[in-house]
């Protein structure tokens, strides 16, 4: 997460936009993400004018600045109209639902978490872009409201128990089969030894000429 920049003193408040719970879904990480998205839409010269404090976006003009705050205000105001529908990115999903990265990947793979598409970004220090899934905020809100995470964890725990039971049963069968094979080899070995002993006796008889 980017470091929070302190609001400089002697700045004039131009406009404020509180972020609703429907927009943030109770997540400070999502609130910060929304702020970064809004700031990225501004011209580079105006980006430092936008701040976030206690989940409220504010546009502030430092003394002596000649930045075009009117244009910046219009850009943010227009973008805020759809702020509650902004796709939810992975780290926001994990914070909103209080889940691990492993759970997110597993539930996305089996369809319990429903992807709303993919995005590509190039991270600093990496040559290639990475692709990740994003999620519909209303779907994440539904998962949160219905406490589906608890139900999914119970399902996963039951599956894990069943998988361990099956693995133990399979291992027991393999051990039994191994014992049977070893017992069969022991019987075969004993039979070969007895047969050789008996044949040795017949050879003695033949050597004495008793079989002629």
Image (cartoon, grey):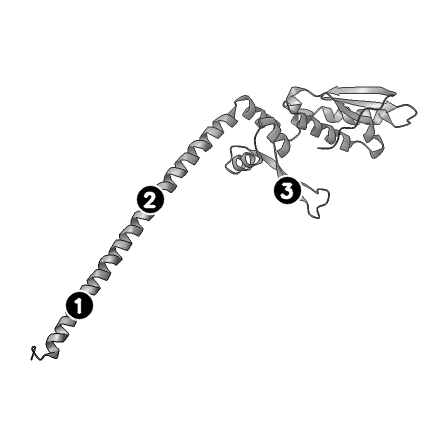
Quarter in which the C terminus is drawn = bottom left
- Residue 166 percent across, percent down from the top left: 37, 40
Q: Is residue 19 visible?
A: yes
**Which class describes the residues within 10 Å of circle 2: few (<14), some (14-19), or many (20+)?**
few
Quarter in which the N terminus is drawn = top right
Picture quarter containing residue 73?
A: top right
Q: Are marks 2 and 1 in contact (CB under 8 Å)?
A: no
Look at the numbered disc 2 and give the secondary structure of its residue.
helix
Q: Which residue is mark 3?
A: 131
Query: Residue at position x 60%, y 31% from top?
Result: 94
Of labels 2 and 3, earlier in sequence is 3
Give the number of the disc on residue 197: 1
**Which class describes the residues within 10 Å of circle 1: few (<14), some (14-19), or many (20+)?**
few
Q: Is residue 88 visible?
A: no
Q: Which residue is mark 2?
A: 172
Query: Residue at position x 77%, y 30% from top?
Result: 39
**Which class describes the residues within 10 Å of circle 3: few (<14), some (14-19), or many (20+)?**
few
Look at the numbered disc 1 and give the secondary structure of its residue.
helix
Query: Residue at position x 52%, y 22% from top?
Result: 146
Look at the numbered disc 3 and give the secondary structure of its residue.
strand
Question: Distance between the Cα atoms at labels 2 and 1?
Answer: 38 Å
Query: Residue at position x 54%, y 34% from top?
Result: 103
Q: Are marks 2 and 3 in contact (CB under 8 Å)?
A: no
Which one is nearer the viewer's eye here, 75 or 13? 13
Question: Distance between the Cα atoms at labels 2 and 3?
Answer: 44 Å
């Amino acid at each position: 997460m980017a470091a929070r920049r302190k609001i400089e003193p002697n700045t004039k408040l131009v406009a404020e936009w509180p972020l609703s719970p429907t927009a943030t879904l109770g997540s400070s990480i999502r609130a910060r993400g929304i702020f970064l998205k809004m700031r990225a839409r501004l011209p580079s010269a105006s980006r430092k004018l936008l701040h976030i404090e206690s989940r409220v976006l504010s546009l502030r003009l430092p003394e002596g600045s000649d930045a075009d705050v009117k244009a910046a205000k219009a850009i943010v105001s227009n973008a805020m109209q759809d702020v509650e529908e902004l796709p939810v990115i992975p780290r926001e999903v994990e914070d909103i639902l209080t889940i691990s990265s492993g759970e997110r990947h597993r539930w996305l793979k089996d369809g319990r978490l429903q992807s709303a598409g993919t995005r590509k970004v190039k991270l600093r220090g990496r040559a290639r872009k990475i692709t990740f899934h994003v999620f519909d905020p209303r779907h994440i809100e539904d998962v949160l409201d219905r406490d589906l995470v608890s139900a999914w964890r119970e399902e996963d725990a039951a599956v894990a128990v069943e998988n361990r039971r099956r693995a133990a049963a399979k291992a027991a069968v393999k051990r039994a089969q191994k014992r049977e094979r070893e017992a069969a080899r022991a019987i075969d070995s004993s039979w070969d030894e007895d047969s050789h002993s008996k044949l040795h006796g017949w050879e003695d008889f033949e050597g004495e000429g008793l079989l002629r």
